[in-house]
Image: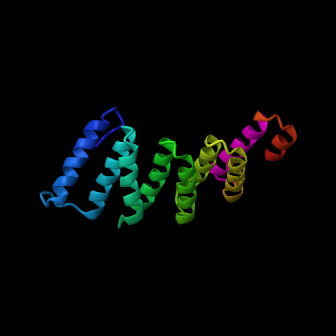
């Protein structure tokens, strides 16, 4: 189910048909295969701007998927879907929850940075700055930590706070 080439509607139809056949017992697949298809289905819905349906699917997977990697992936996609649908306070909270629930995730840095970005998008610049400072401190030396420092620097540069810009370097 490939929604990357503008074929989201086709991906949605394919996933709906496949999941219907699995539910009816016409096709036997592993739980993980079913969950992967549900994740692809949710992503296709989001790509087609069907946010309520996609967010519902991702919420279900992020809370009840038996496969830990699917649950983790759905949790992060859920946060991004909330952000894409302009539910910014909910998205920031979802990124924070992901960071708490999956502190060892390879996507931790992305979630922490996205939380700050979401707060800035929600016109909460001081909260965004605090989030990026936390990220920079928590992930010192990691790519996301360096990206956080860059965001802090840009934040200060925008306001021409040269003394703070130098401190952030």
Q: Is 74 placed above or below 150 here?
A: below
Q: Is 121 placed above or below 104 here?
A: above
Q: Which residues are magenta?
A: 141-157
Q: Quadrant of residue 151?
A: top right
Tell me if residue 147 is in the magenta stretch.
yes
Magenta stretch: helix, strand or loop mostly: helix
Q: Is 58 placed above or below 65 here?
A: above
Q: Quadrant of the C terminus?
A: top right
- For residue 44, side relative to residue 102 (left or right): left
Nearer to the camera, 131 or 138? 131
Q: Spot the residue most to the bottom.
A: 66
Q: Position of residue 48 (x, y in %)?
A: 36, 37
Q: Spot the residue most to the top.
A: 6
Q: Position of residue 103 (x, y in %)?
A: 56, 64
Q: Quadrant of residue 159?
A: top right
- For residue 146, side relative to residue 62 (left or right): right
């Amino acid at each position: 189910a490939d929604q990357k080439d503008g074929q989201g509607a086709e991906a949605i139809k394919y996933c709906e048909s496949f999941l219907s056949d699995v539910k009816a017992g016409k096709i036997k697949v592993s739980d993980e295969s079913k969950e992967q298809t549900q994740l692809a289905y949710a992503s296709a819905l989001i790509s087609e701007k069907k946010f309520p349906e996609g967010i519902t699917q991702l919420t279900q997977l992020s809370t009840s998927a038996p496969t830990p990697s699917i649950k983790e992936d759905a949790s992060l996609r859920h946060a991004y879907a909330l952000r894409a649908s302009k539910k910014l306070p909910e998205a920031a909270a979802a990124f924070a929850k992901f960071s708490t629930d999956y502190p060892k995730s390879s996507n931790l840095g992305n979630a922490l940075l996205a939380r700050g970005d979401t707060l800035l998008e929600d016109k909460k610049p001081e909260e965004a700055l605090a989030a990026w400072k936390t990220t920079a401190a928590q992930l010192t030396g990691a790519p996301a930590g360096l990206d956080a420092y860059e965001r802090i620097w840009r934040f200060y540069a925008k306001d021409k706070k040269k003394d703070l810009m130098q401190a952030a370097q």
